[in-house]
C-alpha cells in the first residue's frame, strides 16, 4: 500500500509533538507500507497573515504531489493546516482520506481565554468534513471531537520510542532539578509551574527548575521568574534534540507537565517511558495512561500551594517514587507499544481502502 502523508512539519526535523509523533510512527510503519511525506517549505513567521501562509503552504504541497505523478492508495492528513491540500487532492486523485486531528484550535484558545482565528476554524471544519476516517491520539480528544464530528472516530495513541541510552550518561547539570520541556505558549502552563516552584523551593532549598523549549511566551516566563526572585534557580534552555532531552530526563528528580490543554502528552509519555517520576495536570490526553499515585502524579496547578505541597511530599518519599516510576514505565509500554500501534494503523488503512466507494 502507498500512503501519501501531508504534514505541516517534516518528521526528520520535528519542531513540536506532531513532528515527533510522525517521526516515530513512520519509522514503525515503513517496514510494512510505502509512505511519502509532503510538507510545505515556508515558515509561518515569514507571512503577514495566517491565511496567506495556509494558501501558500497548501498550494506548494499540491504542486509537489501532482508534479511527481506517483500513484497512491490513500491520503493521511495531519493537522487542519493541511486541510485545503487534503481535500483538493482527495477529489483530484480520487483517493480516500484519513485525517489525524492533533488538537482543536477552539478548545486550545478557550483555555487561554483568546478568540480562535476564524480561518483556523474553517480549516478544522474542512478537514473533519472531508475525511473518510478521523483519528485522534486520546479519549480526551475523542470526547472533544464528538461535539464537532458526526462520524466514527478511532483512537490510536502515539507509540513509545523504544530508545535506550547505552552505558552511563555523564551528568550535564550538577544540581537537583525538576525538568519540563515543550513549546513556550500559554496552554503549556509554565507560568503556573513557576508559581508552584516559588513555593516549593522554600521546602527544597537545593532544588532548581530547568525549562527547555522555544516560543512567544519565553520573555513573559523570564519576567515572571525575576518577579518571584527565581532568576538564579531557573534555567531556560533552547529547543533540545531527543538525546539531550533523554539525558536531562535521566538526571532530574521529576519531570513536570502542567498543561491546561494537552490532546495527548507526548513529553509526559516519553518521561514515563524513561522511568522518570512524572507529574501531569488533571485533564487532557494524560488521563489515558497517567493514574494518580500509581503510574504518575496528577496535580491541580491552579492551586499553587496545594500543588507545591504535593510535589514536596513525593520528592521526600523515595520508596513511593520508585514504585510509581516503575509502574509508569510498564504502563506506557503496555498501552503504547509499537507493535500495537502499527497493527492498529495497518488495520485502519486497510479498512478505509476497502470501504472507499472509489475502489
Image (cartoon, rainbow, N blue to C red):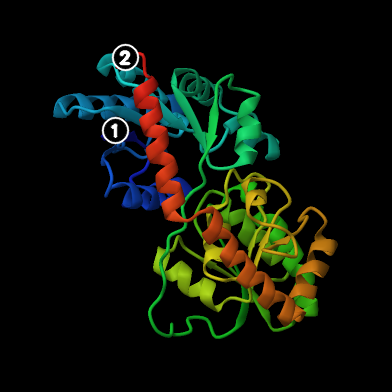
Tell me the CA gap for discs 1 and 2. Answer: 17 Å
Query: Seen in the image, is 257 located left or right of residue 63?
Result: right
Between 303 and 87, the one nearer to me in the picture? 87
Q: Are marks 1 and 2 in contact (CB under 8 Å)?
A: no
Residue 16 position within the rendered picture, expressed as x and y whole percent measured from the top left: 46, 49
Between 122 and 228, the one nearer to me in the picture? 122
- Front position among marks 1 and 2: 2
**Residue in the picture at 46% in, 63% down:** 238
Q: Mark 2: give few (<14), some (14-19) or many (20+) Cα within 10 Å.
A: few
Residue 47 position within the rendered picture, expressed as x and y whole percent measured from the top left: 39, 33
* 216 shown above or below 171: above
Disc on the earlier residue, 1 or 2: 1
Give the quadrant of the C terminus.
top left
Between 81 and 155, the one nearer to me in the picture? 155
**Residue in the picture at 34% in, 25% down:** 353
Residue 139 position within the rendered picture, expressed as x and y whole percent measured from the top left: 62, 40
- Per the image, label 1 sits on a secondary structure element best described as strand
* 304 shown above or below 248: above
Q: Which image quadrant for residue 345?
A: top left
Q: Which image quadrant for residue 149?
A: top right
Residue occupied by mark 1: 4
Specify whether residue 160 is in view. yes
Query: Seen in the image, is 200 located left or right of residue 59?
Result: right
Give the quadrant of the N terminus.
top left
Specify whether residue 49 is in view. no
Between 231 and 245, the one nearer to me in the picture? 245
**Residue in the picture at 63% in, 71% down:** 325
Q: Which dot marks residue 296?
A: none
Query: Seen in the image, is 58 located left or right of residue 344?
Result: left
- Per the image, label 2 sits on a secondary structure element best described as loop
Query: Seen in the image, is 72 located left or right of residue 56?
Result: left
Residue occupied by mark 2: 358
Amino acid at each position: 500500500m502507498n500512503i501519501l502523508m501531508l504534514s505541516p512539519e517534516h518528521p526528520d526535523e520535528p519542531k513540536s509533538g506532531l513532528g515527533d509523533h510522525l517521526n516515530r510512527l513512520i519509522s514503525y510503519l515503513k517496514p510494512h507500507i510505502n509512505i511519502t511525506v509532503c510538507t510545505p517549505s515556508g515558515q509561518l513567521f515569514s507571512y503577514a497573515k495566517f491565511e496567506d501562509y495556509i494558501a501558500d503552504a497548501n498550494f506548494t504541497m499540491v504542486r509537489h504531489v501532482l508534479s511527481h505523478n506517483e500513484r497512491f492508495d490513500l491520503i493521511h492528513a495531519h493537522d487542519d493546516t493541511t486541510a485545503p491540500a487534503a481535500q483538493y487532492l482527495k477529489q483530484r486523485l480520487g483517493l480516500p482520506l484519513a485525517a489525524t486531528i492533533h488538537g482543536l484550535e477552539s478548545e486550545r484558545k478557550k483555555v487561554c481565554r483568546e478568540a480562535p482565528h476564524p480561518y483556523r476554524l474553517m480549516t478544522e471544519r474542512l478537514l473533519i468534513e472531508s475525511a473518510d476516517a478521523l483519528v485522534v491520539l486520546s479519549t480526551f480528544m475523542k470526547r472533544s471531537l464528538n461535539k464537532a464530528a458526526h462520524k466514527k472516530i478511532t483512537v490510536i495513541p502515539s507509540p513509545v520510542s523504544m530508545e535506550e541510552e547505552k552505558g552511563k550518561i555523564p551528568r550535564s547539570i550538577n544540581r537537583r532539578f525538576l525538568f519540563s520541556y515543550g513549546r513556550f505558549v500559554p496552554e503549556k502552563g509554565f507560568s503556573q509551574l513557576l508559581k508552584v516552584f516559588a513555593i516549593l523551593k522554600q521546602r527544597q532549598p537545593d532544588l532548581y527548575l530547568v525549562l527547555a523549549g522555544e516560543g512567544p511566551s519565553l520573555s513573559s516566563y523570564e519576567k515572571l521568574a525575576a518577579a518571584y526572585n527565581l532568576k538564579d534557580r531557573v534555567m531556560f534552555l533552547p529547543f533540545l534534540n531527543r538525546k539531550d532531552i533523554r539525558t536531562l530526563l535521566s538526571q532530574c528528580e521529576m519531570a513536570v507537565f502542567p498543561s491546561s490543554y494537552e490532546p495527548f502528552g507526548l513529553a509526559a509519555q516519553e518521561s514515563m517511558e524513561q522511568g522518570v517520576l512524572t507529574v501531569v495536570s488533571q485533564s487532557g490526553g494524560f488521563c489515558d495512561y497517567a493514574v494518580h499515585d500509581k503510574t504518575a502524579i496528577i496535580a491541580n496547578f491552579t492551586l499553587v500551594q496545594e500543588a507545591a505541597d504535593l510535589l514536596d511530599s513525593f520528592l521526600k518519599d523515595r520508596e513511593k517514587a520508585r514504585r510509581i516510576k516503575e509502574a509508569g514505565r510498564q504502563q506506557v509500554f503496555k498501552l503504547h507499544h509499537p507493535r500495537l500501534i502499527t497493527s492498529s494503523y495497518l488495520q485502519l488503512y486497510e479498512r478505509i481502502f476497502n470501504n472507499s466507494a472509489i475502489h
